[in-house]
């Protein structure tokens, strides 16, 4: 059975139980009230009957009769019985005389009051003492008015239960079906996503927090899976491509040297060439592994509270040691007045690698021309902007700058492996940030980093 029908059935059964409970409760209390009220009316009549029958004052007796006829309506088949209890008439004789149970007669005599329902007739009996005798005054009548109203009320309650039950059943089936429409849409969309269409995402909703949370969680999962697929694909493709050149050089150098005897100087030169290619192979291996690691690390890094201005100054110090001729300038004009707006949660080592890579590229591809780095803060992010006056990137090649080992066509005279920007993007992405690049050939390049601030204001 489908989940939606299970939920609908549960709602219908719950509604039916509640309707029966409330409808039955109303009928039960009304039933008891009607009979209790009727017994009170019979008791009043029995009391009045005893008083005007045994009162010796004829005027008062007539007054009681007038009061009874004026203020007490005549009940259906109303009857009055007055029985004297003495040596000649016992309680058993009274029970036979009235055709009522002896238990009822005993209760009236001992307790002074009792009620009895016999089929559709109600009886109320009281004990009255006059002079030297005890009397049993019993008034009986049929409660047709209450029975008719209870019957009518019962039919109304049953009709209301059936009507409400039908409405609730329809609404339960309708809403249980349509409440799962968003989940059905998610399921249909997920079926379209495969290894060749990992870029597809489920459109987020903003009118349903729970469904939207489910969609966001699933989209995050797809982002991690897509990153893992890309890393795996890039690692295999790049490894096979980049390893080929140094391995071919090493093998070729070795084969040439083995073709005939060489001088010690030639062997030294050959070994030096093989060592250079081995170093290059080691560097490529390390960068590929590190790139793969950052691609898989979406939730596995250790973070701490950091200040971005301190990170930038530390990265600048590293560049100064590696390239003393750099002209990197830190612009503090955009710093926020509140230093807490510069704080982020992040991994210091990874962020230093990213910032250092960007500054190194800016200095290298601008031939050590001035490079400006600014730090600012928006409502949600800390922003780092690096601007150089370098060679720029051709517009047609901008879409590929984050592909591992891709190098722009105008960078042949510069050393590099094309691993820096993909690595930086992965690091910023791990920190839930965004890296954007804008470039114009022979004008320069601007790199913008946005990282959510720590929200400790």
Image (spheres, grey):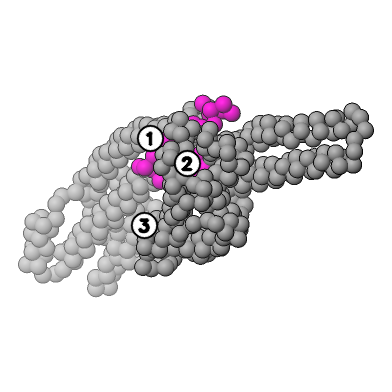
C-alpha gap between disc 1 and disc 3: 40 Å
Q: Which residue is at a point 90% across and 31% down the rendered structure image?
A: 258
Please name whichever residue, 2 or 180, is drawn nearer the observer in this view of the structure. Answer: 180
Give the farthest residue toward the right: 261
**Residue of label 2:** 391
290 lies above or below 115: above
Q: Residues within 10 Å of mark 3 (few under 14, many from 20)?
A: few
Q: Which badge, 2 or 3, comes first in the chain's sequence?
A: 3
- In the displayed structure image, the side of residue 138 where residue 360 appears, left or right: right
Number of on-image labels:
3
Residue 9 in view (yes/no): no
Q: How crowded is mark 1: few (under 14 residues within 10 Å), some or many (20 or more)?
A: some
Disc 2 versus disc 3: nearer the observer? 2
374 lies above or below 417: below
Name the quarter where the C terminus is drawn: bottom left
Residue 72 in view (yes/no): yes
Check if residue 240 falls in the magenta segment: no
Q: What element carries label 3?
A: loop
**Residue of label 3:** 379
**Residue of label 1:** 175
Residue 225 in percent (x, y) is at 58, 38
Q: Which badge, 1 or 2, comes first in the chain's sequence?
A: 1
């Amino acid at each position: 059975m489908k989940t939606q029908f299970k939920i609908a059935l549960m709602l219908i059964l719950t509604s039916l139980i509640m309707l029966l409970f409330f409808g039955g409760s109303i009928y039960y209390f009304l039933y008891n009230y009607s009979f209790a009220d009727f017994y009170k009316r019979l008791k009043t009549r029995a009391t009045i009957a005893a008083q005007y029958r045994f009162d010796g004052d004829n005027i008062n007796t007539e007054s009681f009769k007038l009061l009874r006829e004026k203020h007490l309506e005549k009940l259906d088949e109303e009857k009055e019985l007055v029985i004297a209890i003495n040596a000649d008439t016992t309680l058993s004789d009274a029970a036979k005389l009235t055709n009522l149970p002896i238990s009822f007669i005993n209760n009236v005599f001992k307790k002074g009051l009792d009620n009895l329902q016999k089929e559709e007739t109600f009886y109320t009996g009281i004990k009255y003492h006059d002079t030297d005798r005890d009397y049993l005054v019993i008034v009986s009548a049929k409660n047709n008015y209450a029975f008719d109203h209870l019957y009518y009320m019962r039919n109304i309650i049953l009709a209301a239960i059936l009507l409400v039950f039908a409405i609730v059943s329809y609404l339960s089936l309708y809403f249980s079906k349509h409440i799962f429409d968003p989940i059905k849409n998610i399921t249909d969309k997920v079926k379209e996503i495969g290894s060749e269409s990992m870029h597809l995402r489920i459109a987020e909703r903003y009118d349903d927090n729970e469904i939207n949370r489910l969609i966001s969680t699933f989209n995050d999962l797809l982002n991690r899976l897509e990153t893992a697929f890309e890393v795996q694909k890039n690692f295999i493709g790049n490894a096979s491509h980049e390893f080929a050149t140094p391995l071919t050089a090493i093998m070729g150098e070795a084969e040439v040297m083995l073709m005939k005897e060489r001088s010690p100087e030639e062997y030294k030169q050959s070994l030096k060439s093989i060592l250079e290619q081995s170093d290059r192979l080691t560097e490529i291996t390390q960068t590929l592994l590190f790139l793969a690691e950052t691609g898989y690390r979406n939730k596995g890094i250790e973070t701490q509270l950091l200040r971005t201005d301190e990170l930038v100054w530390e990265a600048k110090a590293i560049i100064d040691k590696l390239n003393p001729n750099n002209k990197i300038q830190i612009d503090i004009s955009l710093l926020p007045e509140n230093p807490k707006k510069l704080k982020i949660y992040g991994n210091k080592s990874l962020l230093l690698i990213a910032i250092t890579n960007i500054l190194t590229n800016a200095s290298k591809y601008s031939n050590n021309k001035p490079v400006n780095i600014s730090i600012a803060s928006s409502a949600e992010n800390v922003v780092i902007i690096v601007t150089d006056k370098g060679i720029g990137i051709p517009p047609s090649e901008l879409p590929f700058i984050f592909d591992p080992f891709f190098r722009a066509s105008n960078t042949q005279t510069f050393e590099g492996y094309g691993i820096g920007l993909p690595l930086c993007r992965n690091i910023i992405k791990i920190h839930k940030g965004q890296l954007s690049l804008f470039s114009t050939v022979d004008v320069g390049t601007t790199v913008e980093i946005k990282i959510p601030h720590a929200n400790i204001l």
